[in-house]
Amino acid sequence: MCPNSSKNQRQNWLNWGVFLLAVALNLNGVESGKSESSAFAGYVGPETCRGCHPVEYQRWSESAHGLAERPLRRATDQMAFHPPRSITHGADTTTIRTNGNELQIVTLGLESNLQPFRVERVIGNSPLIQFLTPFPGGRYQVQEASYEPNSNQWFYVYGDDFRNPGEYGHWTGRGMNWNSSCARCHNTRLKKNYNAATDSYHTTMAGMSVNCEACHGPLQKHLDWQQAHSPSTGSDPTVAPLSPARVMGLCASCHSRNTDLTGDFAPGDSFYDHYALEILDNSQRWYPDGQIKDEDYEFAPFLGSKMYQAGVTCLDCHTRDVTKPQFHGNDLCLKCHNGGYPKAPVINAAGHGHHKLTGKGGECVGCHLPVTVYMQRHSRHDHGFTIPDPLLTKELNIPNACNRCHTDKTADWAMKYTDNWYGTNMNRPSRERTRWIAAAEGGKASAKDKLIGLLSDTNQSPYWRSVSAAFLAEWADEPATKNALLRQSQNEHPLVRERVARSLEPALADTNVLKALNLLLNDPVRNVRVAAAWALRATLDLQSQAGQDLKCWLDLEADQPLGQFKIALFMLSRQQLAEGLKHLQKATAWDPISPPFLCTQAQVQDQLGQLEEALKTLDRAEAAVPDDPHIPYVRAMILRRNGRDAEAKAAVDRALRIQRDFQPAVVLRQKLMGME
């Protein structure tokens, strides 16, 4: 499992744009799909495959998929626990030990005291292992003390980000809950089964780890057919071929940062019918050229690559059974870039790369799939196939592959070589696109027309057109932007339609926008329907297909604080303030240091006539995150609404001391000064 964002990042992981939308509006658990018995019908388990496919089974059993999750194996796992050892992080010490028949981690628990916790399951194999501890309510929690088998070292998976008991991201918190965050990608055909009434789980699965049926689907019919026709020389009609679209959807379901809409994805299903893909947008989770920054995984950057646009799929490079590269070194890339594939330019690796062919510098992946280390030990390749551009490093602080290796050199040093080697070829359209997106991230209107052009360009991939739609939300109520978005509301790709639906929300007052969004409520693909339903949530018919889709999504996320916040926003948009407050209070109880949750709760409390409670809520927020200008700004708004202008001025001044150019506070201060 991958750890959630750091404490400092967490105050930004919920886009403040959502919060500001709630301000602008003035604030006036059951999984979908088949039943459990039906969902698991026909799954026979990997051992059944072993008899006919022994070679493939052996390779799989030793692979990252085969070892994605497993029960504890005392014979081998006790090597990590014996002899006992300790690791320190800050002022805390964690001890790893054996105690009789148990393997234990002694660390801070929910009550902020050292306790021994039994480990019961294992996630991962290489380069690191994480251990699962059973908790009440059917939970498993992922320990923050993790193990690197190759070095026989234990380490703190958050690095220098120290988390305290009671926080969302602490190992005992909901941010590190296996049922919600890890289970579906580390196992086969899983049902989370969260019960909101008891705040508990009854998580079930067709099989532990990512086994054969995770990709091929249930194989009982295949087994029956083979037994009935053995020995057989014919083609088995029960096994569906892995088409390119099916391959991409299967890989994307786990190898992307996404929002699960149904909890019911099965092999062969459309990815976009079950997931809302997270892409480069104004959340600051990506670099403006599309490179990964946070733990964004492989699929989204790959969608934005020239490789994907040329028709390359995951299985063109990775093996089917163990997903490792098909060839070593540059042989993998040169199987296409040697003149044998018409869409791939011929590349002479030595001449093109200007590096020796030995070592990292001589490999294509060293430049075009740069590595970022996550979870302190896990090196992952960016799959955007980007071009190293030191000029963008100098202009926009975007990392480039040259300086990732040559860490002792400057961007100017790298620019000298790239300009000498490649000349004007460095000035590619992707460089200009990056500049527009960086400008849009800064809210600069100069990017608007360029992004409109990108959205309308049929030669661009759906990914980059979707990215442009996401950023154009900033100017959605302007005629040119609105018309450009409306023209793409019937785009052939569901990712584009989904992003258009999201971006049109600020322009709901326009009748043409309402008409377009209402049409999207009946879109054939669920991710689009959910996006349109969220935009129209204030008046949505909950009995409609889109209404049911939205309800399913909200129910599915009800076990997380962000899910409770979304439910609250839904209630508030329908003028159900008291009901919305209940969900906000649950969100802040589960994540007590998130400014968006606390600030929205304070505003609702104020509107319900609970001014003193609202101010106490903001006290909590400022104590937890003293350097966020939004919090004193919200306090100033609330105080002004209640006629306490002197206190409001003090609060807005505090916001401006934190961030001098914080525009909402600047405007509010001008209004307050004008009242004197």
Image: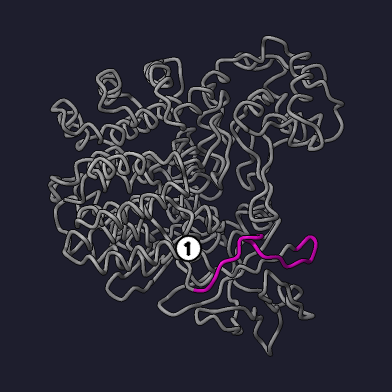
Q: Residue 558: x, y in percent?
A: 32, 62
Relative to 495, residue 624 above or below: below
Q: Position of residue 568 (x, y in %)?
A: 25, 58
Q: Residue furthest front?
A: 676
What kind of element bears circle 1?
helix
**Where residue 569 sits in the image (x, y, percent)?**
25, 53
| Viewer-proximal residue among 375 and 165 | 165
Residue numbers of the magenta segment: 149-165
- In the picture, measured across the screen, residue 193 lies left or right of residue 182, that is left
| Figure quadrant of the C terminus | top left
**Residue placed most toward the observer, 447 or 276:** 447
Residue plotted at (74% across, 21% down): 415
Residue at figure coordinates x 46%, y 26% from the top left: 464
> Which quadrant holds residue 297?
top right
> In front: 515, or 640?
640
Q: Which residue is mark 1?
A: 175
Q: Based on the picture, tell me whether residue 163 belongs to the magenta stretch.
A: yes
Q: Which quarter of the image is occupied by the N terminus?
A: bottom right
